[in-house]
């Protein structure tokens, strides 16, 4: 309701208008089986045509860069900063471009680089050139020029009609630090989280499993497995986990003490299954998502001039962190996609998926950091939306990793009109058993979809009924 009221008074650029009829009728098209935000994304893309100058402008990343740079300084937080444009593909014929490329290729330079197509979106076509890569001698000035040329030639079919007419070019920028470079980070990669200490067909002998268990120091309850040079690890709450469709648990203590007859019964029951030892860091030392090998990009979705939510995708969409403000209140909340899931359930899901997921303490640690920037990125995103008169727009910012706040500022990355992102809207459900996971996630997704529909379609419906400033 709060967003619908905002819609009635929002000064909207007609180039971004989507009439209520289109929003309703679009449900009948071929994308009907898709979630509503996919339909919204497709509809926005269909409306981004070449006869709309604002659509052409917002799809041209370099033009948007210049536009944002020319905006007046907002009343709060100072000028909106952007990553410097060091060299573009269009600069190739300028006398200073060759010197700039030579400096960027210098092995002694401490700056990591990213080559970025400016006519694409969502990180497509990025190429990173690190200090270590330049030290190999393979990334000379001509090689960087070739990377620019290749990036400018890249194409992607999932773009609007307006974006198809955007000039193809590329830019070299400094690379923003990765999340794992901060004090909550480290050199650990995802494989460090899920360690198959040994995986073998279940037909192997009981003694082979006992031998594996003897490599660990088991507590009386069989719950702790210590490995040299790795600190303390939980031995999957004392269980061995069958990796595959469904999870079968077998207490490590019981396996250690099992008779041959009991073991043969298990072999017969689970014939053909593969079993593995699943180790994870002890809760006392696991307080950060250390393998996030990408910058912290807070994507701020603005609807009718107000922030709807901001999200950071840590590694993949299974590990989204959401920052939201329930209007008209001003207080922020920060949750992961797994809000309310106990660590025991998340452990189970990790084993089934074979990939790391944010646990409770990790979410708390990252939320504490991300909330430091919530007010600033929301204010600047709303400022840009107001100047563009864009009723539905996403503004993406890079924010510094923990411990690097004084070295790196918050910077704008890009502005995107064709955004259909949504989040899982929790109502505080507690998930304490794996069987509850899918129904809860489904209801959260459906709840968020209905809210998204109410905000976007409800806003345009309200304007159609009572008009609205243009």
Image (cartoon, grey):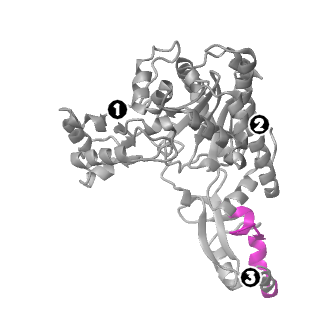
- How packed mark 2 is, by other alpha carbons closer than 10 Å (few <14, some 14-19, many 20 or more), is few
Horizontal side, residue 385 vs residue 277: left or right: left
Q: Could you say which disc has been placed on residue 248 in the image?
A: none
Horizontal side, residue 124 vs residue 315: left or right: left
Q: How far, Cα to Cα, is label 2 from label 3?
A: 45 Å
Q: Could you say which disc has been placed on residue 85 in the image?
A: 1
Residue 382 in sight here: no
- How packed mark 3 is, by other alpha carbons closer than 10 Å (few <14, some 14-19, many 20 or more), is few
Circle nearer the viewer, 1 or 3: 1
Q: Residue at x 41, y 35 (%)?
A: 166
Residue beneath label 3, please? 271
Residue beneath label 2, please? 450
Q: Which residue is drawn at 19% across and 36% down?
A: 99
Q: How far, Cα to Cα, is label 2 from label 1?
A: 40 Å
**Nearest the eye: 160 or 383:** 160
* Nearer-N-terminus badge (1/3): 1
Tag 2 secondary structure = helix
Whether 281 is drawn above or below 386: the answer is below
Tag 1 secondary structure = loop
* Nearer-N-terminus badge (2/1): 1
State the extent of the magenta-drawn residues as a range.
234-262
């Amino acid at each position: 309701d709060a967003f619908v009221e905002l819609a009635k008074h929002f000064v909207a650029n007609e180039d971004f208008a989507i009439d209520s009829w289109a929003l309703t009728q679009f449900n009948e098209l071929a994308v009907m089986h898709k979630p509503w935000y996919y339909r919204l994304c497709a509809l926005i893309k269909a409306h981004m045509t070449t006869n709309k100058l604002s659509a052409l402008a917002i799809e041209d990343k370099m033009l948007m860069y210049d536009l944002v740079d020319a905006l007046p300084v907002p009343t709060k937080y100072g000028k909106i900063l952007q990553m410097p444009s060091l060299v573009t593909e269009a600069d190739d014929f300028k006398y200073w471009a060759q010197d700039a490329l030579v400096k960027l290729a210098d092995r002694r330079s401490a700056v990591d680089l990213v080559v970025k197509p400016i006519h694409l979106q969502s990180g497509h076509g990025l190429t990173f050139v690190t200090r270590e890569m330049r030290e190999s001698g393979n990334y000379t000035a001509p090689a960087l020029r070739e990377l620019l040329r290749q990036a400018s030639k890249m194409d992607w079919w999932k773009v609007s009609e307006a974006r198809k007419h955007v000039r193809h070019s590329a830019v070299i920028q400094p690379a923003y630090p990765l999340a794992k470079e901060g004090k909550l980070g480290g050199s650990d990669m995802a494989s460090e989280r899920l360690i198959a200490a040994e995986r073998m067909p279940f037909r192997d002998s009981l003694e082979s499993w006992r031998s594996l268990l003897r490599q660990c120091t088991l507590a009386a309850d069989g719950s702790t497995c210590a490995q040299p040079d790795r600190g303390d690890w939980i031995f999957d709450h004392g269980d061995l986990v069958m990796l595959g469709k469904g999870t079968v648990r077998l207490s490590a203590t019981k396996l250690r003490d099992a008779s041959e007859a009991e073991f043969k019964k298990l072999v017969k029951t689970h014939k053909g299954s593969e079993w593995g030892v699943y180790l994870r860091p002890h809760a006392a030392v696991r307080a950060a998502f250390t393998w996030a090998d990408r910058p912290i990009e807070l994507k701020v979705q603005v609807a009718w001039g107000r922030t709807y939510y901001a999200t950071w995708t840590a590694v993949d969409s299974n590990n989204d962190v959401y920052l939201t403000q329930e209007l008209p209140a001003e207080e922020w909340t920060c949750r992961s996609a797994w809000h309310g899931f106990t660590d025991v359930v998340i452990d189970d899901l990790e084993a089934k998926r074979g990939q790391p997921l944010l646990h409770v303490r990790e979410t708390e640690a990252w939320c504490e950091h991300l909330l430091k920037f919530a007010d600033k990125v929301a204010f600047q995103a709303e400022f840009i939306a107001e100047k563009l008169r864009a009723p539905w727009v996403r503004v993406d910012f890079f924010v510094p990793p923990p411990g690097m706040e004084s070295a790196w500022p918050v910077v704008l990355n890009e502005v995107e009109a064709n955004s259909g992102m949504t989040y899982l809207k929790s109502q505080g459900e507690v998930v304490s058993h794996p069987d509850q996971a899918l129904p809860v996630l489904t209801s959260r997704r459906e709840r968020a979809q209905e809210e998204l529909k109410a905000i976007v379609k409800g806003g345009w419906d309200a304007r159609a009924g009572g008009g609205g400033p243009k």
